[in-house]
Image (cartoon, rainbow, N blue to C red):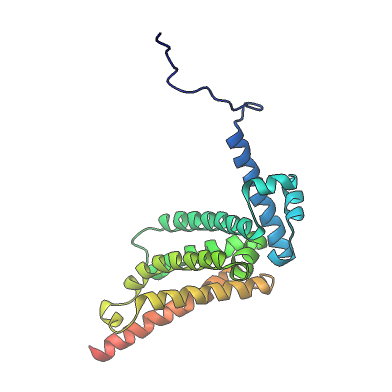
Amino acid sequence: MDVSLPDHPPLNKRRYGGVLPEERQRLRRAKLIEGAIEVFGTKGFHGATVREVCVAAHLTERYFYESFKTLPQLFLAAYSELREQLMALTLAAMEQVPRSTNPLEMLAPAMRVFLVFIRDDPRRGRIMLVDSLAVSDEVAAMSGATARDYSALLKQHLTRLLPSEQLDGISLPLLADGMIGLNVLLAARWMQDGFAEPIDKVVRTNLLPYEGLMHLAKHNAAATG
């Protein structure tokens, strides 16, 4: 007796309101991340609880454990979400700058995007600049990876800012890492001071070390020419 079987097994998944269970779980996870940004960004990670995050997300605690095992795991997800948002905004801003623009001036839009990102929503700054180094080794590693991503972008500009002969004997990766670190510290200080300084002044201040590098390179080139 030949019994034909269907090509695909029947789905035992029930739709609620036309939404599959996986999609509902994804939406709940997204709401938890939004709640985490609110709680972590206002109270800080170490002052937060699972219950507070769930209240902010308008979900019961059982849904927290559906997607996350611990608060540090949720913090990592919230940080990753902000990281992706910031990188997308940064790349979009840089793509709008004509390639013929002075390489120093090309850095300004990227710096402004970062500063606007934390000024317009200080919760982002607290998560990315303050708590990210004190939650877990995994979060600290993600923070380091973010810095390296921006350092890689900066290295491309440093090779345009500085003559190749001026890079002899200099570690370009270390220089880029150091400059990114300086920009982050300036932004963190600006945030701690309540964003009191005008943003144009902060952008200009961030650019000053790069201008110094260019002038120093030109001076050394003239001295050895």
Instruction: Specify whether 37 is left or right of 217.
Output: right
Instruction: Name which residue lies at 27% across and 82% down.
Output: 168
Quadrant for the C terminus, please: bottom left
Quadrant, the N terminus: top left
The image shows residue 191 at horizontal and vertical percentages of 65, 70
84 or 95: nearer the viewer: 84
Q: Name the spot of residue 13 as percent of width and height, x first.
A: 59, 28
Left or right placement of residue 103 versus residue 33 in this view: left
Residue 36: % across, % down: 67, 55
Determine the image quadrant of residue 171. bottom left
How many numbered dots are placed on residues in this image? Answer: 0
Residue 58 location, quadrant: top right
> From the viewer's perspective, is residue 173 above or below residue 93?
below
Q: Vertically, is 214 above or below 29?
A: below
Residue at far left of view = 225
On screen, residue 186 versus residue 162, left or right, reads: right
Q: Residue furthest front?
A: 1
**Residue most toward the bottom?**
223
- Image coordinates of residue 119 in percent, x first then y, are 63, 63
Q: Nearer the viewer, residue 136 or 167?
A: 136
- Residue 194 lies left or right of residue 153; in this view the side is right
Residue at 51%, 67% (x, y): give it.
Answer: 141
- Residue at 62% x, 59% y: name it: 75
